[in-house]
Amino acid sequence: MADTEDVFNEILNHGPSADSLLIVLTRMKKEGRLNRVVQECIKFLRVYPDDIRLRFLLAESYLGIGFIGLAEAELKKVISMIEKLIPAHKMLATIYIKQKRLAEAADMVKHYLAYHPSEPEALKLLEEIELPILSDEVPLKVERPTDDVVREVDEPIDAVVDFATPTIAELYHAQGQLSAAISTYENVLRNNPDDGESLRRLNELRRMAAKEPVPDDKEKDDLRARKEKMITILERWLPKVREIRHA
């Protein structure tokens, strides 16, 4: 024991690196020498003020001694330091997107949203990531629903109204459902009347609708089939949006 103590003192007295310091003080904490750990942590935090591990060790030691107030103060500092690094999750998500690693990108954005659940930029990014993921998962052949649940071609999906976003509107448009896209943009603007980009796009779609010929029966069938496929996508996607919005 004396030899170990001498080694520890030798390390502590000769400017240890942050890693070496953490090894020594963690060993001391396991041995129950909490007062010494507190003293050394306080001393070396002047040298390594941004070392989260050292500060967390100090908080643990304070708590072990019974200094709850001091432990709380240190843990608040630790959390503050961690929160400053949270944007790294969103940055990594953008890298994964460029590498076409969409599932991993979605996970990174969700980690970010755990700290910033209402940030519009992150919510929009998650929409853009998850829509193609879910689209790829939907089988190409979609069973026709029975007549009592078939929606009219021009009728918007009610479940989408409360979660109307430009992304959903553009998905409608991509599926050839111009009327539904227009209705979705109208709902976007009801919630966000200052959204100039959505207003511009809505006017474009209205002009397109005015020029659009009346579809024949075959075109109506094609539109219905595309809509059924998108309903399947949206029904699987909307619960994820609800979970994020109400987290």
Image (tube, grey):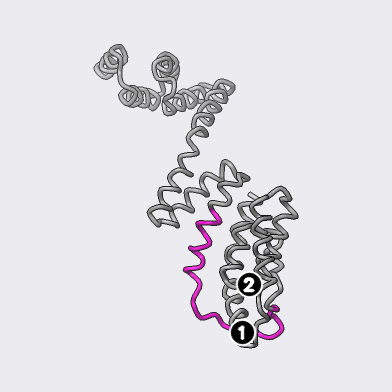
Q: Going from the N terminus, do you reach mark 1 or mark 2 first?
A: 2
The residue shown at (70%, 75%) is: 154
Could you tell whether 220 is left or right of 93 in the image? right
Q: Please state which amino acid type lies under the numbered disc 1.
A: Asp
- Return the residue at label 1: 221
Q: Residues within 10 Å of mark 2 (few under 14, many from 20)?
A: many
Residue sitting at 67 percent across and 78 percent down?
153
Going by the picture, which residue comes out furthest to the right? 190
Q: Is residue 29 above or below residue 208?
A: above
Question: Would you say residue 133 sits in the magenta stretch?
Answer: yes
Image quadrant containing the N terminus: top left
Q: Position of residue 176 (x, y in %)?
A: 59, 73
Residue 119 or residue 182, whichever sits in front: 182
The foreground one among 99 and 46 is 99
Disc 2 secondary structure class: loop
> Quick one: SS at disc 1?
helix
Q: Position of residue 134 (x, y in %)?
A: 51, 65
The magenta-colored residue range is 126-152
Residue that label 2 marks: 177
Residue beneath the point at 71% across and 50% down: 192
The one of 97 and 67 positioned closer to us in this rendering = 97
